[in-house]
């Protein structure tokens, strides 16, 4: 699935050079559920951006199913993200003026899916996350946990091979956090998705069969829980 070889990422901040990733190498097999932990600024989100083709490494290679993401054109990357990779973020990123169903449908617009098909697939995705009866609600009419479920449905509606989740429970209370992790774990088991979950929460990370820790741009494997 993923092969990362000697990836570095540096940023220039004024006169200061920030080394976000330092020679990271990693293999993630198809169907794995991997949690990535680490301190703020340690490189977690940068690594996830590399996996999602949202940023390019300064050096090294990131391949997904044999395709070099760093070597793709912007158009090729956009197509790969639209058809292969689903994203879930801490802040939900829902459009407040659209209903839950319409928010999910937006993920299919770049793929030029017909309107009727978009609607039926969006409804099925909401059903899969337990919100089949909330499709006509605006985000402001939903709880934080429900909004995150809509965001997960939006990621799933593309039928991706990979789900990348960046602190998906960071804005939720403990009870809702556990419900969202249960949902993600269930989707992993039922759909065979490859899931990479970035989290600062050890309770969440310990639910994953495989755990990694990244700090100061350096990655290491943690013992299985």
Image: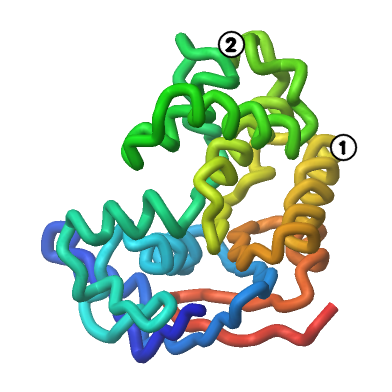
Looking at the rendering, in which quadrant would you find the C terminus? bottom right
Residue 148, image quadrant: top right
Q: Which mark is residue 219?
A: none
Dot 1 or dot 2: first in sequence order is 2
For the residue carrying disc 1, how many other residues have a C-alpha within 10 Å: few (<14), some (14-19), or many (20+)? few
Residue to which mark 2 is pinned: 138
Name the foreground residue: 42 vs 178.
Answer: 178
Residue to which mark 1 is pinned: 175
Q: Position of residue 69 (x, y in %)?
A: 29, 72
For the residue carrying disc 2, how many other residues have a C-alpha within 10 Å: few (<14), some (14-19), or many (20+)? some
User: Viewed as shown, does residue 147 lie left or right of 177?
Assistant: left
Residue 14, image quadrant: bottom left
Q: Position of residue 56 (x, y in %)?
A: 25, 68
Which residue does the image show at 30% across and 80% down from the upper left?
Answer: 8
Marks counted in the figure total 2
**Is disc 1 placed on a helix, strand or loop?**
helix
Residue that lies at the very extreme toward the left in this rendered image: 15
């Amino acid at each position: 699935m993923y092969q990362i070889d000697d990836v570095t990422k540096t940023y220039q901040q004024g006169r200061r050079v920030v080394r976000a990733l330092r020679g990271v190498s990693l293999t993630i097999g198809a169907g794995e559920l991997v949690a990535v932990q680490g301190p703020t600024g340690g490189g977690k989100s940068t690594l996830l951006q590399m996996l999602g083709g949202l940023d390019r490494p300064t050096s090294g290679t990131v391949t997904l199913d044999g395709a070099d993401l760093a070597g793709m054109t912007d158009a090729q990357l956009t197509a790969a993200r639209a058809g292969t990779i689903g994203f879930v973020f801490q802040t939900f990123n829902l459009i407040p003026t659209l209903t839950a169903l319409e928010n999910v449908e937006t993920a299919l617009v770049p793929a030029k899916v017909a309107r009727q098909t978009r609607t039926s697939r969006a409804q099925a995705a909401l059903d899969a996350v337990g919100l089949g009866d909330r499709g006509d609600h605006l985000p402001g009419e939903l709880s934080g946990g429900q909004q995150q479920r809509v965001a997960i449905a939006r990621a799933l509606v593309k039928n991706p091979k990979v789900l990348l989740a960046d602190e998906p429970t960071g804005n939720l209370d403990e009870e809702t956090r556990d419900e969202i992790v249960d949902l993600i774990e269930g989707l992993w088991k039922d759909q065979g998705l490859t899931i990479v979950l970035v989290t600062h929460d050890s309770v969440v990370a310990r639910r994953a069969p495989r755990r990694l820790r990244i700090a100061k741009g350096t990655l290491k494997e943690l013992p299985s829980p």
